[in-house]
Image: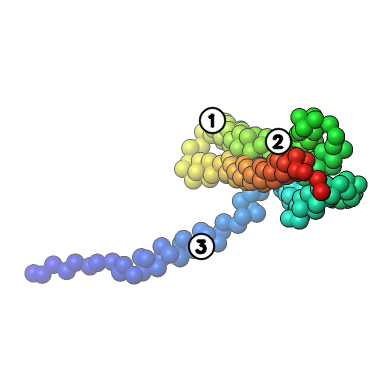
Amino acid sequence: MGILLQLPDTSKLIAGAADATQQAAEKINLWSLLDKGGWLMYPLYGLFVIAIFVFFERLIAIQKASRIDVNFMNIIRDNIITGNISAARNLSKNTNNPVAHMIDKGLQRIGKPIDTIERSMENVGKLEMYKMERNLNILSLIAGIAPKFGFLGTIIGMIQLFFAINETGKFELNTIAGGIYVKMITSGVGLIVGLLSFVGFHFLNTQIEKTGNKMEAASADFLDILQEPTR
């Protein structure tokens, strides 16, 4: 007597698994998921809003400071060599960027020793760098505390979960798994906010360094101009 082996229809099994996965994905909604994180999500939202505001505020300020006319130093050189210091000062006063502020300070010190002029310009340069770096440490702070704050939310949630299990005596896998993934939402959001703040902080620092290099180059050019013979 022959033995009949009945194999399950694999196509139906695959289709059923796909439908189940699709249904599970449809149930996961970003906003409802974030809402399950509890009240500890609100401080993380606040940190995120602050990070976004500081990043764009500093980005606009740094971009404005880095806009330097390529002909600026050429015009300054021509005016100094021809002895028209007043025209050079008018140009530097009417140009609103760190390089122009440094050059204006150097023009005010013309006639004094080169070392004195250089120190005066360095002081202005440090002040301009400070202005660009202002409030930038807020991003660094958020990058450090947001992940820790999210982890704190997860720890508090886990304590609440296990306390409830201890009180009720119910130890069901679905309940535990659901409670754990909900409590880990704060850690995920904290890591995302911290990562974005970290990237934004270093990006802005890079832009500031580029502007600082332009300032150093302009300062060196100005000191060289002062030592050129006048016409």
Q: What residue did someone put label 2 on?
A: 137
Question: What element does badge 3 sit on?
Answer: helix
Residue 212 image point, x, y percent: 69, 42
Q: Looking at the image, how many numbered discs can be counted on the residues?
A: 3
Secondary structure at badge 1 equals: helix
On screen, residue 74 versus residue 36, left or right, reads right
Residue 145: give its label: none
Question: Can the viewer see residue 56?
Answer: no
Residue 44: x %, y % from top left: 68, 41
Residue 166 has which mark? 1
Comparing 184 with 8, the one in front is 184
Q: Is residue 98 above or below residue 127?
A: below
Closer to us: 176 or 207:
207
Which residue type does callout 3 highlight? Gln
**Residue 23 numbered mark, or none:** 3
* Residue pictured at 8% horizontal, 69% vertical: 1
- Mark 2 → mark 1, Cα distance in angstroms: 44 Å
Above/below status of 166 relative to 66:
above
Disc with the residue nearer the chain's start (2 vs 3): 3
Q: Earlier in the sequence, mark 3 or mark 1?
A: 3
Does dot 2 land on a helix, a strand or a loop?
Answer: helix
Label 1: few (<14), some (14–19) or many (≥20) C-alpha neighbours in 10 Å: few
Q: Earlier in the sequence, mark 2 or mark 1?
A: 2
133 displayed left or right of 10: right
Q: Label 2: how many residues lie within 10 Å, few (<14), some (14-19) or many (20+)?
A: few
